């Protein structure tokens, strides 16, 4: 969510400066196939609030090989492109960095992933919408959890990062959150959960429990945790996998604003002659971060949120 808002911002900014814009369909795949469209104000009309991307998106396996990246560089030259702006996550940035080695005109990256796992920027485009979607879903599932006095395991996306899990758990008042950044072992985590459940049940026997878990984290899958919790407590346990709905929908205002700022800034950075940089955001202001610097930094979960976690769960 917010990719369209970013495309729109790039186009409108370019238009105000009399710069022509084309959009490659499905990212690097379009670049390899020479599949592109002109982007004028017609194409971006009414686009700000729409989820998804009008240019489509894809995971491009070929772009992992230098020979294909070189072909993409040739295509950019043949098409007389003066600068390239890419919007995406980890894979997009790896591709952009490689492409910059074979093409000497500016490449600027806008961080677009719900995972928020790109260092050098406080937020990535789409992340805040994904949290909103997760929070709304957890609010709804809580009604069933509470009425049936069940435990719900809510599986949220994030790849290998706990940003969505942590912030959706806090914002929905979940009872427990399982994060890749702090996960040690299934055995230890199970003890933590059972302790929390016992305390809570002592205080209110008929309560529900919401546990938010980062995707792909629990060894063997969430069914294993479901079975363990059921056999230890006798309580009904259900799994809710939020999956790709988190990557859809109309962007929240924070993502619209961020995407608009970063799209605008990316074009300005290009005109200043910057290349091989990401347009990121720090304390609400856009900043340029060299591609190489991104990999060297570690992006940590907010320490204050982590510290307060234990103090904000309901207990006996
Ligand atoms: O990186 C974004 C992301 O949505 C992750 O949160 C998730 O693990 C992955 O992509 C899903 O990828 P796909 O759409 O290819 O299944």
Image (cartoon, rainbow, N blue to C red):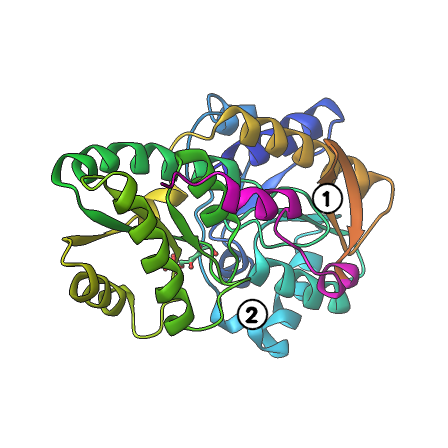
- Give the residue at x 51% y 46%: 310
Name the quarter where the C terminus is drawn: top left
Query: In the rendering, at what x and y percent does residue 283 appear?
Result: 75, 34
Q: Quadrant of ligand 1?
A: bottom left
300 above or below 169? below
Mark 2 Cβ inside 8 Å of ligand 1: no
- Please tell me which residue lies in front, 266 or 89: 89
Q: Are marks 1 and 2 in contact (CB under 8 Å)?
A: no
* Residue occupied by mark 1: 279
Instruction: Mark 1: give few (<14), some (14-19) or many (20+) Cα within 10 Å.
Output: many
Asked whether residue 40 is in view, the answer is no
238 above or below 220? above
Picture quadrant where residue 210 is located: top left
- Give the residue at x 62% y 32%: 258
On residue 63, which mark appears?
Answer: 2
- Indicate the secondary structure of the residue bearing disc 2: helix
Q: Which residues are magenta?
A: 292-316
Q: Would residue 239 appear left or right of 59 to someone viewing this image?
A: left
- Please tell me which residue lies in front, 169 or 315: 315
Mark 1 Cβ inside 8 Å of ligand 1: no
Picture quadrant where residue 136 is located: top left
């Amino acid at each position: 969510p917010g990719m369209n808002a970013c495309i729109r911002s790039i186009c409108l900014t370019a238009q105000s400066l009399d710069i022509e814009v084309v959009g490659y369909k499905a990212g690097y795949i379009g670049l390899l196939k020479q599949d592109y469209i002109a982007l004028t104000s017609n194409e971006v009309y009414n686009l700000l609030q729409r989820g998804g991307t009008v240019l489509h998106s894809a995971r491009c396996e070929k772009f992992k090989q230098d020979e294909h990246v070189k072909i993409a560089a040739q295509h950019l030259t043949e098409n007389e492109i003066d600068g390239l702006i890419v919007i995406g996550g980890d894979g997009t940035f790896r591709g952009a960095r490689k492409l910059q080695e074979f093409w000497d005109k500016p490449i600027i990256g806008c961080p677009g992933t719900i995972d928020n796992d790109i260092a050098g920027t406080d937020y990535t485009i789409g992340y805040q919408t994904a949290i909103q979607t997760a929070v709304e879903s957890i609010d709804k599932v809580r009604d069933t959890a509470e009425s049936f006095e069940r435990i719900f395991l809510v599986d949220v996306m994030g790849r290998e990062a706990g940003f969505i899990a942590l912030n959706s758990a806090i914002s929905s008042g979940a009872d427990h959150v399982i994060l890749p950044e702090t996960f040690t072992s299934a055995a230890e985590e199970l003890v933590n959960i059972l302790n929390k459940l016992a305390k809570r049940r002592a205080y209110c026997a008929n309560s529900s429990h919401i546990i938010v878990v980062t995707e792909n984290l629990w060894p063997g899958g969430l069914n294993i945790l479901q079975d363990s919790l059921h056999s230890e407590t006798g309580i009904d346990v259900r799994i809710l996998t939020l999956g790709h709905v988190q990557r859809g929908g109309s962007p929240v205002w924070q993502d619209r604003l961020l995407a608009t700022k970063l799209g605008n800034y990316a074009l300005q950075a290009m005109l200043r002659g910057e290349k091989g940089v990401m347009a990121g955001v720090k304390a609400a202001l856009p900043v340029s971060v060299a591609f190489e610097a991104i990999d060297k930094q570690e992006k940590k979960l907010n320490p204050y949120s982590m510290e307060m976690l234990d103090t904000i769960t309901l207990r006996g």
